[in-house]
Image: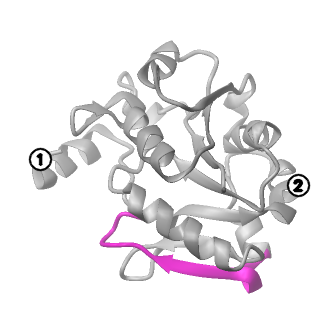
Amino acid sequence: MIPILILAAGASSRMAPRDKLLEPVGGEPILRRTARIAGAASQTVIVILPPDRPLRLAAIDGLRVDRVIADDAALGMSASLRAGILAAPPAPGLMVLPADMPGLETSDLAQMIALFAQDPSRLLRGTSVSGQPGHPAIFPADLWPALAALTGDEGGRGVIVANRHRLTLVTLPGDRAILDLDTPEDWENWRKITGG
């Protein structure tokens, strides 16, 4: 089974003073929703949290997930990736999933996991129906050291670019793979459209 690593240690600075990972989607905080759908797709879900957001920890209370505090989360997304890789059990691959993707469903994650199982040497990345690359991504195990060596807030983009010869894009419905909501205006507009 492919572990799912949920990146939930970001500062959410563009939402201040609100925390975007606590924004409700379908009646539950988006962080809890993301962890819940991930748990339906994989037996191992690792949620990376910052040391200073106890409400995020509370939001996933009762879910069958591993909680990892990234004490150096302020250094950027690379710190979360390192913490997640250290916590991940041996596996052929690792799905990296941002916590703020309100359109993704368990079926999307399961589709990507099933495709990866057919060829665990491939690097997978979700795209919108228009072909715009987004999330989630599945990194084969031999690329984990490259992820762990990243610095700053770039995330796995550099590893994907360096291994584009191994990349397979997976089309997910609509704009699910690219929809993330970073500002109060983003959330307001999305709720007007979806009622979410």
Name above or below for residue 24 compared with residue 121: above
The residue lying toward the viewer, choosing from 13 and 36, is: 36
Residue 131's quadrant in the figure?
bottom left
- The image shows residue 109 at horizontal and vertical percentages of 48, 60
Q: Residues within 10 Å of mark 1 (few under 14, many from 20)?
A: few
What residue is shown at x 56% (from left), y 50% (from top)?
A: 42
Quadrant the N terminus occupies: bottom right
Magenta highlight range: 163-177
Q: Look at the image and name its color scheme.
A: one colour
| Residue at numbered disc 1 | 195
Identified by mark 2, the residue type is: Pro
With 29 as the anchor, is 43 left or right in this view?
right
With 16 as the anchor, is 138 left or right in this view?
right
Residue 145 image label:
2
**Can the viewer see residue 178?**
no
Extreme bottom residue here? 165
Name above or below for residue 174 compared with residue 88: below
